[in-house]
Image (cartoon, helix red, strand yellow):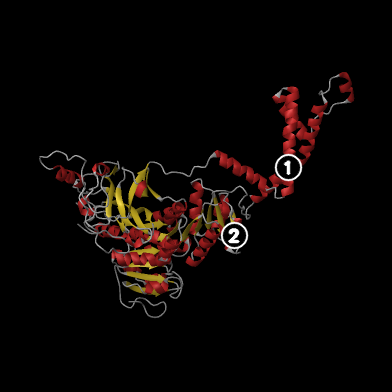
Amino acid sequence: MTSEGWGTPPVEPISQHYIVCGGNALAHRLVLELVEHYEVPVVVLVTDRTRDHAPQIEQITGVAAVVEYPNLTEEALRAVSIDTARGLALVEGSDQDNIHAALSAQGHNPDIRIVFRMFNQRLGENIERLLRNGAALSGSATAAPAFAAAALGRPNSVEIEGRYLHIAFDDAISSDRICVIADHIDRQDLSKIRLLPEQEGDSAQFVRLAREFGDDGPVRQGGLRRAPEPEPEAGSDSEGEPERGHEPAVGPEVERAVEPDPEAEPEEPPGGIAALQALRMEPREPISWVRRLRWRVLDTMRFLTNARLRVVLLIALAAVLMAFAVLWYLNRDFGWTVYISLLDLAGAAQPDQQADIATGTGTGGLWQRVAQVVITICGITFAPVATAIAVEVLGSGRRGLPRNPSAGTRDHVIVVGLGNVGTRVATQLYEMGVPVVCMERDPQARGISAVRALGIPVVLGDGPFEEQLRRARLKHSRAVIALSGDDATNLEAALEARHGNPDVRVVVRLFDDDFAGHFYRTLDNAASRSVSYLAAPAFAAALMGSEVRGTLSVFRHVLLIAELTVEDGSGLIGLNRHDLEDPGGVRVIAARFARSNQLHWGFADRTRRLAPGDRIVVAATRSGLARLNTVLVEEV
């Protein structure tokens, strides 16, 4: 049911509901998460029902009401029954507006759970201390690692207690994997992916071995033969929820003992798999000092934009080196040769006098005098050029003057769009040691000053993408990330980039899943991500009281890494690993018990029941985490 009219409250009284303030893409995804996976009543407060995603939000089945108010005022909060609501999500507007709304909501309802979007994470942490039950999240910070990793052609990671969890595919999976998190991976049809497929118990491998050996007979020569696995049932939901009765992978010990049956009929390939693995240290992008030195030299030469002047300087440099060699050959004293050469370059050398030559006390020799003259003349050429370079370097660092890409920029990533997400991605790539060039059409974009402070080059202007990408040195780039808020604009930038450099990797921000599916099928060496799809599960989980440590991308699907605390009165008390994992969509990957501060990875005791004070780290699908959150708030 939706409200009638403009700015009117819900038609029917409502309580114990959740309020989402915003009509953008993140609000749209968040409403879907709450309605489909948490099955809670949702009231949406928008500024304009006809703009952005508000019309699509009104069509979502399960939305209790959509209320329109031009500003997030006290009256607007009362219109959505803030006094009886269980949670409030502020996912649109500026940081200042969200802070004001959060404090106002707490004044109306001190017990309400408040989750608000903040770009300034440090400020958000300070505001959390002012709220009784609040959490500040950044959608751009949640999604940025996935975009940065996609540009580099590797999965993003989530840091847990000094370990970096990431997803490995097929041949990249090692024997120390934590768990299998996806199978049936078909890159041409991403709807076939199953996240967290049904797994067998930890003892299943040993039971299989016992059946193969039998009670009496010896081991059959030629090794073990693996029994055929049941065919997966047809059909899987869009998220890839688990189906029963299929084990995608076996342990490395059993796999080495398995040999194919020569009489068996060949089976169809089961498709790719993905597994969760951990690294002790997040890998950086190594750049050799030789390449960095070459870039610096080319950067310096860039300031000498006149080709003829470059030729003159190169000839002068060659002449100085030859003259230096003559001086060293005649005197056989390297230190003195350097000393006199520098003085000659600066025009401070003392020439020979006729009286000195007559008495035999001169520098000695025609060739030495010629060499000194050559060095002195070349020094006259170098002095003004060095001054011009210094002035240019200092001038380019002035505020309000972004630095353009230099001639030495190579193997860099081009970030198109300096909104919240683009700024985060550019900053993260820079911190990883990857060269970055940014493009922005709006000279007032907030991200320009942030990346300029890091010394990242920015190409400004609203010209055609072809020209802008050329200025960003597309020919020498390794990847292009299109991060504007419009799918069509991002696709245009990606296609122009691929036209200008067929080998460049393109990563595109796309909201529409069907659009993304066509994108994957049409372009190779490409990836797409959705900011709202990556961030909405974290906002929904936070609204329910869980702490999502990060999200991992499996193509267009998302896996959540969350840490749950077992508190007094929680429905998790008394549950074990079987209870948590058997319904599907959840893997317990680590546990920290109340009596110990140590985090146990791959805790093997599946019968140990949770007690107050315990903490568990889980990998979960969106619906799996929603189920745990439902249990979390239940009373014993």
Mark 2 Cα-neighbour bin, 10 Å: few <14, some 14–19, many ≥20: many
What x and y, as percent, mark residue 503?
Answer: 51, 54
**Quarter of the view holding residue 48:** bottom left
Mark 1 Cα-neighbour bin, 10 Å: few <14, some 14–19, many ≥20: some
Inspect the image, locate mark 1, and give the three-letter code of the amino acid beneath it.
Answer: Leu
The answer to whether 549 appears left or right of 122 in the picture is left
Report the front residue among 348 and 149.
149
The answer to whether 258 appears left or right of 540 in the picture is left
Instruction: Determine whether 539 is above or below 356 in the image.
Output: below
Helix, strand or loop at label 1? It is: helix
Instruction: Determine whether 350 is above or below 588 in the image.
Output: above
* Location of mark 2 (residue): 468
* Location of mark 1 (residue): 313
What x and y, as percent, mark residue 233?
Answer: 24, 61
Inspect the image, locate mark 2, and give the three-letter code of the amino acid beneath it.
Answer: Gln
**Quarter of the view holding residue 103:** bottom left
Considering every residue shown, the one lying at the far top of the view is 359
Which quadrant does the N terminus fall into? bottom left
Mark 1 to mark 2: distance in Å?
A: 31 Å
The tag earlier along the polypeptide, 1 or 2, is: 1
Q: Is residue 242 visible?
A: yes
Helix, strand or loop at label 2? It is: helix
